[in-house]
Amino acid sequence: MTMLATAAAPPTALLVKLAARPDFTTVNAMPRGAERKQAAYTAIAATAASSQAPFIALAEQLKASGAVTGYETLVSPNMLVVTPAAGKAQAVAQAFQGAQGVKAVYSNRDGMKVGAGGVLAGLTPGASTKGFDVVDEPVVEVAPPTTHPYGVDLVGAPAAWAQGADGHGLVFGSIDTGADVTHEAIAAKYRGRQADGTLSDDYNFFDPSKTGAGAHDSDQHGTHTIGTVLGDGTGVAPKATFISAIGLAGNVDSTLKSLQWMLAPTKVDGSAPDPTKAPDVVGMSWWTGSPKEDLFLENLQDLRAAGIEPVKSAGNNGPAAQSISSPGQYPELLAAAAVDAGGNAASFSSRGPAPYPAGSTTPKPDFAAPGVDVISSLPGNKYGKMSGTSMAQPHLSGVILDVLSKYPQLTHDQLNEALKAGAVDKGAAGFDPVYGNGLVNLPATLAAAAKLLGQA
């Protein structure tokens, strides 16, 4: 598991999450598509606008007193990101914790809740706790593949393509290290590529650090995972397109902002959010925060309300039990365990159940997918092998894109049921904490989906 560390910084901001939530009853009954995405975002934004006013006033009062140096608001989750002045973090945390309508206050450094009285070690400067679910070893570069990487065949993708289930018309949203949008395997799949070959990053690329560098990969992890989803010669859903956010570029608010951006992408300058340009599947192959916390819960609920499927790597903390990495613990997303070319569980793949909610457990992982020695794209028109549940997530994401491209009318519950019915049972009979519901299999899943929809 690769860890990212940031240098010591001024006292961290506070993430003040509000309790007010939209009523999604009507939205949840809508079919997938642009209208549902718009309706969900409208409800989310309206709730934020109506509930944040008194907390903005409190932040302004604290700013006038010198206790706060600045703040900003998020729509998803319904939150204020408040930066205390030096030495004032605990007092500011207490001020918000005592306000009616505040659900919780978290440290922006590590995503942990601030305890009663505002006391938390995370309020002091230090390294961020975050990283990617890839085995920490040198990447082995390889020649451009002349046949599909084994994972494409192991999930049965070619047989699905023959049925027209190839991801066409759908968009993958990658929250990762960005993407080399000039790579031969994925260049044509970047939604920001115009008909004349020029690039437009508006609504297609998000960098919360605002470097102004344009679409790029800050490492190589993002280009690799995207290639497994949809790359020419490497991808499970080769007709899908993608958009990209650099999601772990700073503290936890960078990740929250990336999730919010996936709900309603914006222009490069952050203006004019447009939920109709949101992706259909969001893939995450990273970890941050605690698998016992609810920090990301509302982000995932909002994506699901919009008809967007979030998919996460299960984590690389195996073979220990209850080792799912955050935010893989939530029922609102699908977490992918990793198997090798023989379909056997990788020793590093995190095991369930997830220790969430506090004092209880959630059955995880959800499914298994290829994640050992996976060949995919690397920046600079290179290719390489990587291992980790980071590599399993894009296989599962590609499978979902394929299924929804053929059966877009599937609800989330129907999609999950079809994936379960089609999965190859592994390990202990039925669901187990190593493989979840089993190794995903596209042809069997498509057959199950057709049966569910009365088209078999």
Image: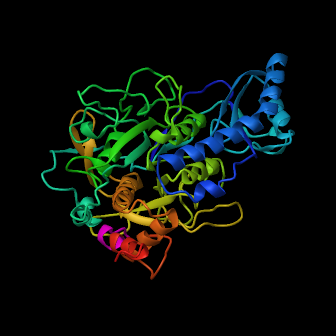
**Outermost left residue:** 146
Q: Residue 45 or 231: which is nearer the viewer?
A: 45
Count of labels shown? 0
Image-based side of 327 in relation to 340, left or right:
right
Image-based side of 442 in relation to 210, left or right:
left
Q: Which region shows up in magenta?
A: 439-445
Q: Residue 338 or 58: which is nearer the viewer?
A: 58
The structure residue drawn at horizontal position 51% and vertical position 47%, both measured from the top left corner, is 35
Residue 331 occupies which quadrant of the picture?
Answer: bottom right
Residue 371 occupies which quadrant of the picture?
Answer: bottom left
Residue 426 seen: no
Q: Position of residue 430 (x, y in %)?
A: 47, 80
Q: Where is residue 220 in the image (x, y as percent from the top left)?
A: 34, 38
Residue 21 magenta-drawn? Answer: no
Q: Where is residue 258 in the image (x, y as percent from the top left)?
A: 52, 37
Residue 218 seen: yes
The structure residue drawn at horizontal position 46% and vertical position 54%, both measured from the top left corner, is 311
Q: Position of residue 59 (x, y in %)?
A: 79, 26
Image-based side of 332 in relation to 415, left or right:
right
Above or below, 405 against 52 in this view is: below
